[in-house]
């Protein structure tokens, strides 16, 4: 066993974790910061974000407009004061990234270029070609190297938080290369562990997006909030689920069914906009939940095409021309060629919705602190209250900067007033972990984690897909609970210490099962349709503000079934109204 | 369809030497090598270890040698190896930790050594909330070199790195050059000692294979050899006393 | 515990890129021979007619002719590889756009042809 002390420990080396580390380092130069990540930071899934990062930029834009878009996008389930803070700090964070070297795409005069994005009434999305997340992550990683007080523990897998008297004391981690346990003591801990898209079979997420941090906080009594809202991105590649950015549509790409018809006009997003002239909040630039739902309807009506095992619609970019595509969407051209053998300049790309983003997460207050003193969360793993029932594209890259920075500063301020917890109390919990691992390792017969995982992915897709029913969700919840029981007797065949990747995949599955339960319970109890949560059963097909203009909070209950509570939503800026896009929005306003 | 895949395995807790193991993997037109490894791990042999994440050739985790060539496992497909067969080995020129997992530490140390971040007095001093002006033409100079995903394939393609692991190598030199070419950067003088040093750009003999294997068309060989021009100019200027 | 695979002396036989590289570097050997011949020739010229005649005889030896023919081919091959690499090492920008690599390569070959023409004119013109 090895032991480390840090003033601030950041768990997760993606965008939010790196931004938090840098903020903490800049807050006070005498603080020692640890950055633990189960992969090298530049492997984190921020790297795969393509489209861009939103901030009010143009003269014709306003904070109010960005707030309205975000709140309407969230179907009024966003915390409005949090949205207000976000919108006001977004621009400064993107400029800060620019000062750190991020290669934002430019206009001819050398100023920042912004592009259109779904659900946004004004162009406000900064981008670096179609590799925005990649450039942001590498810029942050490289910038973090300037700060000698940031010490990285790369390829360390965090097993558990250590919490003493409702305050954070540190974490227990395994060094993946050696299998050795490390007890890491810290005055503040920031969770920046990303989403949990991998509990679904068909998703755009990397293999590491398994919800570890969410589950760890949850098991220590922190609520998971709004977990039922799972974003399906309308354009994933069939088979792999690889993401085709919304920027493809922002640049003018259109969605067609197997008959070549622009079907979105039939789902409250019309009228049809002329080819090559995309209009904000119309047709292809509607929000993601609406587009994914339209796919499902087309599929039911038998108007989807087929690619391999998948029903698909088509993203047509041909009219944009090869030169423009190479300039604005080079990565999309590369991905389409490699994974579906399509040249977007010549053929439409087959696409289908894929799970993309976990809107819910670890409940925090507006300062990113959880209900455990000194424990913070930022980025996709957190529910600070920005996204509500549906996230708008390009809000999350900005989120990880704005709230990564805030969490870093708050954690630093907290660390300056706290002392380290006593090691002996921490040691007890370490011994427990050690014993559990030893038991797992000693088990020679038992359940296969591969089988449990396969069943989990299928049941989540069946019960918690784009459209949900009471019976389907109840069945899925029962299945998850049965799988949790089977998991107690799970077995790992690899008994080695060095890079035992099987062990970590098995542990990730354990986290995933708890996340799945929270997701499904939230979905089952929310007897209405709102944003990304759409139900088909009677009485639940429309939004019901009277009963459900509330956040769901799911609490872990150990061996018992999880418990759900409701929490009021802050609607202090924009009172709830009809959520409408396309021409329907005009009618709704008047 | 099935393909026999031979993997060079190394289990340090069991044997001091690597050994080969062959697996028979079913595939269709869309099965990538990474998919095949996942299949092996989940269905045939859970002890096989490798790094992976994004499966879309952007995170840089899954570099490996396939039939002797450094390649990202997620970016090649079994269908293209039906005739040749397939031998997978860990990335060349790095110490192997286990199976296909190599020790990345030297790579990261080299990256850090070149100060790969924007050095700019304005950015460090008073915070202005205006972005710099940078025209597309100015961006064009460095943009290609900013696309490196740190996968390490170029190091496996570089015999100079194989012969001398102290050579800071293609990716790190490319990153240094990327910042030197950035119109917003003023840090070239701080980076030149490393580039000029024996382990810097001059260790490169322009084999050029690094650029051939680069999955992102970054062309590290061009960056390194452009650095030689910068380095020569820098040395000449300092000889002439043209620089303080 | 890590294992470092040995790099054998025959590493460069492992793939075609390395073989092409070694071939390019090998062109130095026949070129060295040619330079030696040239240096001795110049020296002989200074030593008087007899030395010069002797050098000329040696130069007509079929083996020497063959090696020099190889050296000529090698220099063309080396020039070809060099010209290919040049646009990547010294990209030239005019008015904000990069001059296409093909144009730079063609320009270099045009230079070679004009040198040949100049030499031909000097000796046979």
Image (spheres, coloured by chain):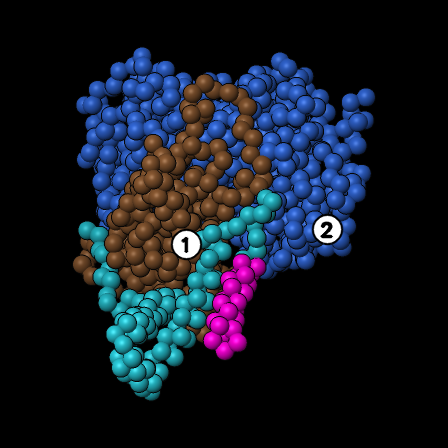
Q: Tell if the residue under mark 1 belongs to the same chain as the one under mark 2.
A: no
Q: Which color was chain A given?
A: blue
* Residue corresponding to mark 1: B221
Is B103 positioned to the left or the right of A371 in the image?
A: left
Residue C18 higher or lower than B104, as above or below: below
In the image, the segment drawn in magenta is C102-125
Which residue in the rendered view is the most extreme toward the bottom? C62
Q: Which color was chain C given?
A: cyan
Compare residues C92 and A361 and report the one nearer the observer.
C92
For the question of whether residue A16 can be seen, the reply is no
Residue at left 53%, top 76%? C125
Image x and y of residue A193, in percent? 41, 34
Residue A505 higher or lower than A554, as above or below: below
Is A40 positioned to the left or the right of A78 in the image?
A: left
Colour brown belongs to chain: B
Q: Secondary structure at mark 2?
A: helix
Magenta stretch: dominant SS?
Answer: helix
């Amino acid at each position: 066993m090895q032991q480390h002390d840090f003033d601030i420990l950041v768990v997760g080396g993606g965008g939010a974790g790196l931004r938090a580390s840098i903020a903490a380092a800049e807050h006070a130069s005498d603080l020692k910061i640890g950055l633990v990540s189960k992969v090298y930071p530049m492997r984190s899934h921020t790297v795969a974000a393509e489209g861009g990062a939103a901030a009010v930029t143009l003269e014709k834009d306003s904070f109010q407009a960005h707030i309205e878009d975000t709140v309407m996008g969230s179907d009024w389930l966003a915390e409005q004061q949090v949205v207000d803070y976000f919108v006001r700090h977004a621009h400064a964070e993107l400029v800060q990234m620019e000062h750190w070297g991020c290669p934002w795409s430019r206009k001819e005069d050398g100023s920042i270029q912004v592009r259109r994005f779904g659900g946004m009434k004004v162009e406000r999305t900064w981008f670096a070609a179609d590799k925005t997340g990649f450039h942001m992550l590498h810029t942050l990683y490289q910038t973090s190297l300037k700060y000698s007080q940031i010490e990285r523990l790369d390829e360390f897998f965090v097993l558990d938080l250590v919490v003493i008297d409702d305050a954070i004391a540190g974490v227990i981690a395994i060094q993946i290369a050696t299998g050795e346990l490390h007890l890491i003591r810290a005055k503040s801990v920031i969770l920046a562990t990303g989403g949990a898209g991998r509990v679904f079979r068909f998703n755009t997420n990397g293999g590491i997006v398994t919800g570890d941090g969410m589950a760890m906080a949850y098991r220590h009594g922190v609520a998971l909030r709004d977990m039922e809202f799972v974003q399906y991105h309308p354009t994933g590649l069939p088979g792999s689920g690889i993401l085709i950015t919304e920027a493809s549509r922002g640049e003018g790409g259109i969605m067609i069914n197997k008959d070549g018809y622009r079907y979105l006009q039939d789902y409250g997003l019309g009228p049809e906009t002329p080819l090559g002239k995309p209009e904000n909040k119309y047709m292809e630039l509607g929000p993601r939940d609406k587009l994914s739902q339209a796919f499902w309807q087309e599929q039911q009506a038998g108007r989807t095409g087929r690619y391999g095992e998948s029903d698909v619609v088509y993203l047509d970019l041909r009219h944009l021309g090869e030169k423009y595509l190479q300039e604005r969407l080079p990565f999309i051209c590369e991905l389409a060629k490699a994974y579906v053998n399509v040249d977007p300049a010549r053929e439409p790309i087959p696409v289908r919705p894929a799970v993309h983003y976990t809107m819910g997460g670890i409940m925090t207050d507006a300062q990113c602190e959880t209900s455990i003193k000194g424990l913070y969360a930022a980025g996709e793993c957190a529910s600070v209250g920005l996204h509500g029932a549906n996230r708008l594209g390009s809000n999350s890259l900005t989120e990880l900067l704005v709230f990564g920075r805030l969490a870093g500063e708050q954690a630093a301020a907290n660390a300056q007033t706290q002392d380290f917890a006593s090691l002996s109390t921490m040691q007890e919990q370490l011994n427990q972990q050690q014993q559990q691992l030893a038991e797992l390792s000693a088990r020679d017969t038992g359940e296969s984690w591969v089988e449990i995982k396969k069943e989990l992915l299928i049941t989540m897709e069946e019960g918690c897909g784009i459209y949900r029913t009471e019976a389907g969700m109840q069945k899925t919840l029962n299945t998850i609970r049965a799988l949790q029981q089977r998991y107690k007797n799970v077995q790992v065949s690899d008994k080695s210490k060095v890079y035992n990747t099987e062990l970590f995949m098995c542990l990730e599955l354990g986290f995933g099962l708890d996340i799945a339960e929270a997701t499904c319970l939230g979905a089952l109890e929310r007897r209405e349709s709102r944003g990304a949560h759409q139900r088909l059963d009677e009485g639940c097909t429309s939004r019901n503000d009277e009963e459900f203009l509330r956040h769901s909070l799911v609490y872990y209950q150990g061996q018992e079934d999880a418990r759900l509570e409701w929490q009021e939503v802050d609607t202090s800026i924009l009172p709830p109204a009809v959520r409408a896009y396309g021409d329907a929005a005009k009618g709704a306003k008047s | 369809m099935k393909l026999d895949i031979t993997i060079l395995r190394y289990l340090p807790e069991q044997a001091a030497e690597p050994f080969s193991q062959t697996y028979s993997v079913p595939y269709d037109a869309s099965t990538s090598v990474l998919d095949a490894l996942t299949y092996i791990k989940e269905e045939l042999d859970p002890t096989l270890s490798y790094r992976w994440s994004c499966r879309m050739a952007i995170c840089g985790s899954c570099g490996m040698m396939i039939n002797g060539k450094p390649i990202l496992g997620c970016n090649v497909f079994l269908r293209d190896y039906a005739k040749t067969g397939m031998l997978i080995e860990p990335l060349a020129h790095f110490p192997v930790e286990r199976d296909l997992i190599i020790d990345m530490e030297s790579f990261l140390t080299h990256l850090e050594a070149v100060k790969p971040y924007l050095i700019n007095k304005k950015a460090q001093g008073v915070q202005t909330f205006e972005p710099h002006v940078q025209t597309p033409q100015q961006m064009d100079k460095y943009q290609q070199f900013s696309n490196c995903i740190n996968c390490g394939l170029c190091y496996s393609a570089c015999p100079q790195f194989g012969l001398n692991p102290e050579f800071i190598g293609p990716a790190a030199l490319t990153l240094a050059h990327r910042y030197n070419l950035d119109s917003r950067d003023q840090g070239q003088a701080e980076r030149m000692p490393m580039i000029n040093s024996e382990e810097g750009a001059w260790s490169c003999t322009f084999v050029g294979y690094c650029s051939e294997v680069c999955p992102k068309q970054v062309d590290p060989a061009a960056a390194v050899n452009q650095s030689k021009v910068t380095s020569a100019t820098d040395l000449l200027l300092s000889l002439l006393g043209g620089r303080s | 515990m890590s294992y470092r695979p040995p790099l054998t002396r025959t590493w460069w036989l492992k793939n075609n890129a390395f073989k092409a590289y070694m071939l390019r570097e090998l062109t130095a050997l026949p070129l060295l021979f040619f330079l030696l011949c040239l240096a001795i020739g110049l020296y002989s010229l200074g030593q008087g007619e007899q030395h010069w005649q002797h050098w000329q005889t040696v130069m007509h030896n079929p083996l020497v002719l063959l090696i020099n023919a190889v050296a000529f081919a090698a220099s063309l091959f080396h020039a070809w590889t060099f010209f290919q690499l040049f646009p990547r090492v010294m990209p030239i920008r005019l008015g904000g756009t990069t001059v296409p690599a093909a144009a730079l390569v063609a320009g270099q070959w045009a230079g070679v042809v004009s040198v040949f023409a100049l030499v031909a004119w000097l000796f046979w013109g």
